[in-house]
Amino acid sequence: MVGTAQNWRVRHAFSVVNGGQDLGPSSAPASNAGSESGGIEFTREDVGALLNERPKRKDRFSLKEKCETLSEYVKRLKLCIKWFQELEESYLLEREKLENDVQVSKLQRDEMGILLKNKEEELNSIIVELRKNYASLQEKFTKEELDKMAAMESLTREREARLEIERSQKSLSDEHARVQRELSSATQKITSLNDMYKRLQEYIASLQQYNSKLHNDLSTVEEDFKRVEKEKVSMVENLSMLRGQLSVSRQTQDDAIKQRDALVNEVASLRMELQQVRGDRDQHKLQVQTLTAEYTMYKESTEKSSFELDDLRSKYTELEVRCLSQSDQIRTLKDQLMIAEEKVQMSDLSTMETRTEYEGQKKLISELQTRLADAEFKLIEGEMLRKKLHNTILELKGNIRVFCRVRPLLADEDLSPEGKVISYPTSMDALGRGIDLVQPGQKHSFTFDKVFMPEISQEDVFEDISQLVQSALDGYKVCIFAYGQTGSGKTYTMMGQPGDPDQKGLIPRSLEQIFKTRQSLQPQGWKYEMQVSMLEIYNETIRDLLAPNRSSSDMLRENGFGGKQYTIKHDANGNTLVSDLTIVDVRTAKEVSYLLERAAHSRSVGKTQMNEESSRSHFVFTLRISGVNESTEQQVQGVLNLIDLAGSERLSKSGSTGDRLKETQAINKSLSSLSDVIFALAKKEDHVPFRNSKLTYLLQPCLGGDSKTLMFVNISPDPSSAGESLCSLRFASRVNACDIGVPRRQTNMRPPDSRISYG
């Protein structure tokens, strides 16, 4: 439907199309209207008036006046459609531009967001790392400070212990020297006593022996001293215990001094107390040995303490150096932290700017999306109006349109001495629409909707029916069938030349256009489902060309020997149903091409005198289309029937015998039934004999219902086929004159389990 007036631009009045004249049924368009169509615009009222216009004629029975009026009306409709197509193209370009802007804005927004997020993550990671480094350095610094304090305290204690040990060593040395002096004096006194006491010489000798024994004991003590050296590590740990032993040694030394005094006092009474002197001497010797061992041990301990002191001093120096370097690192890290904080502040500012820019981009995207939605709405309205105008034109052209196509002369076909039998008038009224067939002494002229000359390509032929194929997607029933004698090019027109993309026929090209258009309509919310079936009518018997595991025995059974029977039925909606027919869901054009090749191998063909490979059956291809628009909730159901009829031929000319004779008779009978149906429709008789053959009964909705039908009449330029060509042209002329009603658009959805129809 047409949008509101607010959505339309200011346009010129429709009278501009007619060269300044008022719109009316009798007004003729200006001669330069077509050339100025690019600058003409329409309003909603102009289009409504054009669609609602009904031609008025002075003489309602004048076909010439009717044709002229309809031709002028069609020209104005074409001009309007051309304007709508240009408007649609501008809308599509604007839509693409807006979509590109939206995509670019989204990409910029995403890139900005990703950049901002990466920057924030990088700064956060830097800050976290700096904080971790700072904390670890603080811990190291604190630990080093504690280690430094502990080392200083240990050094102080070691210094005090060393001083104490040195003082103890000095006092012990003095005491040792004094004891040695006293011992030497005591020894001298003992020697003098030995002189004095001769009776005690033996005893002194024994004492000497005992002294040697003591020397041996001294060596043993030295060995013990070596063992003690090995155990000096444990002795260092037991320093406090040794200090206690030192105090005990001092006490023992005091006792020795007292004993020495007692010995001096007892020298006079040595004889009486010799045994006591011996014991005192032994005790003194033991004390001397103990003091010597302690002195040596303290000397070693002092040396070890000196080494440890030197080690502690070097460690202290190293710690001081490390503390200085770590202090420098801490200052450097503090500077870096300050720089990082400044960077964070700068990044916060840039983040605010980025967010401001992001908000602006977001607003711009919102505006672009709004404009895109408006453009899509206008595009949908333009598409709906285009469909309405397109179908209006097709309805005005008549429900059964006829195109005539003349195939080129073959290499083995020579012109007769009389020359060409087919010519094409060049007058303005008949240019591209007229064809003349010349027989001896008589000229037959015919006019159709379109006449294709032999040099016309397959692409040019399809271009003229592409809009009719589009109607199937719009929800209409469309039927296109090829009629003509054997060898006139029907199968080439419908199927084309296998393996040559440029020679593709109407069926493959129609499928390509449908699937391509379906893809382009997806952005507008349209979704389509498609089903395909293919059959042939051979000797008045229906054959399923897509049946699985089809073999020659199956073909024989279908020919009347116990095969599957297919029945044709028509429902209340004008749809044709064929029971037990194979139906295949398709999604791509390649799938349909594969099915076409499969059906072509299964189709009945044969050789006759008129054609090396003649189609001996009527081929019916059906594509059922179901569409739903999710945005507008509109539903359509269209059908595209593409039919390649078997060629008509005369028995005298084809030379058919046996099975070929039966085939020819069945073909001619079905085509004769088709001719009877056309005659009945042209005369508007009450009874139309659709049931006279399987072909006409199958095509009943296409010929007598609400379908848009196009017939290709194929003509051979061979002079020997002039009679058959004249019959085909006359039949096509009667078909073109038939009025079968107004096509209806199918908007209801079929049930999921319904069979495909041919209506």
Image (cartoon, rainbow, N blue to C red):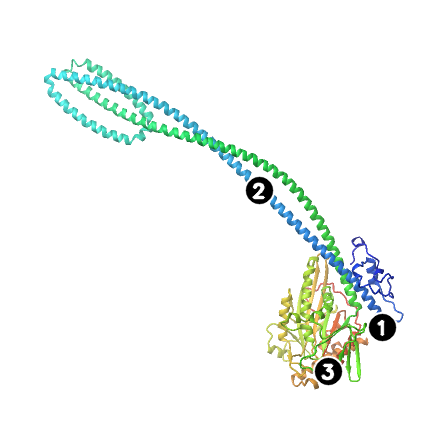
Q: Where is residue 342 shown, x and y percent of the image? A: 59, 35
Q: Are marks 1 and 3 in contact (CB under 8 Å)?
A: no
* Residue 39 placement: quadrant: bottom right
Dot 1: within a 10 Å radius of its alpha carbon, few (fewer than 14), some, or many (20 or more) residues?
Answer: few
Q: Where is residue 51 shown, x and y percent of the image? A: 82, 63
Q: CA distance from mark 1 to mark 3?
A: 32 Å
Does any portion of residue 608 appear in the rendered image? yes
Mark 1 or mark 3: which is in front? 3
Judge left or right: residue 350 versus residue 733. Answer: left
* Sequence-wise first label, 3 or 2: 2
The residue carrying mark 3 is: 719
Closer to us: 106 or 562: 106
The residue carrying mark 1 is: 64
Q: Are marks 2 and 1 in contact (CB under 8 Å)?
A: no
Amino acid type at image mark 2: Glu
Does any portion of residue 567 appear in the rendered image? no
Q: CA distance from mark 3 to mark 2?
A: 88 Å
The label shown at residue 121 is: 2
- Secondary structure at numbered mark 1: helix
Q: Where is residue 207 shown, x and y percent of the image? A: 15, 22
Amino acid type at image mark 3: Pro
* Sequence-wise first label, 1 or 3: 1
Dot 2: within a 10 Å radius of its alpha carbon, few (fewer than 14), some, or many (20 or more) residues?
Answer: few
Closer to us: 560 or 365: 365
Query: Tag count in the figure?
Result: 3
* Residue 517 placement: quadrant: bottom right
Q: Where is residue 74 shown, x and y percent of the image? A: 81, 66
Judge left or right: residue 68 versus residue 344. Answer: right
Amino acid type at image mark 1: Lys
Closer to us: 469 or 344: 344
